[in-house]
C-alpha cells in the first residue's frame, strides 16, 4: 500500500473502513448500511468529497457503530469509543465522535450508537 500527501494510505473506501472497525472487539464492520441496525454493527456512509486535483480527492465518511448488546448510551470515556477511534485513526484524520440514537425500524425504537467523522484521501482509479 502506498501513501499519499499526508502519509495516509491510498485507496481508503468502504471496505477498508469496515475492516478497520471489525478489529474492535464485539463489532462487525460491514461496507454498507444495514436495513435494520443491530447491536455490535459498524458501517461507513459517504458524507462529502472535495477534489484536491485531477487524481486525488479528500473524502469524508460518517462511520456509525452501534453499541454491543447490554451496553447503554456511550460516554466519552467508554472503552469502545477509544477503540473505534484508534481503529479509524490509521486511515486518515478523525474529526469528531458523537453519540447518536439510530432508528431500528421496529415500533419507533432506537439503538444507542456513536458516529465518527473521518477524512481520508482517495486516488483516482487507474483506467
Image (cartoon, grey):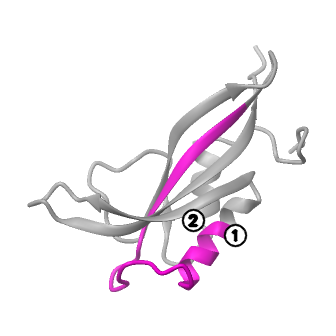
Q: Is residue 108 magenta?
A: no
Image height of 3 relative to 65, above or below: above
Q: Position of residue 1 (x, y in %)?
A: 86, 45
Q: Is residue 84 magenta?
A: yes
Question: Quadrant of the rendered structure where residue 102 is?
Answer: bottom left
- Dot 2 falls on a residue whose secondary structure is loop
Q: Residue at x 60, y 46 (%)?
A: 15
Question: Quadrant of the rendered structure where residue 58 is?
Answer: top right
Q: Position of residue 109 (x, y in %)?
A: 17, 65
Q: Position of residue 89 (x, y in %)?
A: 73, 61
Name the foreground residue: 95 vs 61. Answer: 95
Name the foreground residue: 36 vs 95. Answer: 95
Image height of 86 relative to 105, above or below: below
* Residue 4 shown left or right of residue 43 in the figure: right
Residue range corresponding to the magenta coloring: 58-85
Q: Quadrant of the C terminus?
A: top right
Q: Which residue bears the numbered disc 1?
A: 86
What label sits on residue 5 in the rendered view? Answer: none
Q: Residue furthest left?
A: 107
Q: Residue at x 57, y 84 (%)?
A: 79
* Residue 58 shown left or right of residue 111 in the figure: right
Q: Which residue bears the numbered disc 2?
A: 22
Name the foreground residue: 4 vs 16. Answer: 4
Image height of 2 relative to 85, above or below: above
* Residue 19 shown left or right of residue 121 in the figure: left
Estimate how packed mark 1 is, as few (under 14), some (14 to 19) or many (20 or more) residues with alpha carbons within 10 Å: some
Question: Quadrant of the rendered structure where residue 12 is?
Answer: top right
- Dot 1 falls on a residue whose secondary structure is helix
First reached walking from the N terminus: tag 1 or tag 2? 2
Amino acid at each position: 500500500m502506498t501513501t499519499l500527501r499526508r502519509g495516509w494510505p491510498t485507496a481508503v473506501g468502504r471496505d477498508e473502513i469496515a475492516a478497520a472497525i471489525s478489529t474492535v472487539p464485539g463489532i462487525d464492520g460491514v461496507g454498507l448500511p444495514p436495513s435494520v441496525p443491530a447491536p455490535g454493527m459498524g458501517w461507513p456512509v459517504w458524507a462529502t468529497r472535495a477534489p484536491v486535483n485531477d487524481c486525488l480527492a479528500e473524502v469524508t465518511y460518517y462511520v456509525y457503530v452501534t453499541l454491543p448488546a447490554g451496553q447503554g448510551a456511550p460516554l466519552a470515556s467508554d472503552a469502545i469509543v477509544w477503540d473505534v477511534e484508534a481503529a479509524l485513526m490509521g486511515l486518515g484524520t478523525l474529526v469528531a465522535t458523537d453519540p447518536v440514537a439510530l432508528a431500528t425500524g421496529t415500533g419507533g425504537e432506537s439503538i444507542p450508537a456513536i458516529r465518527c467523522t473521518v477524512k481520508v484521501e482517495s486516488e483516482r482509479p487507474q483506467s
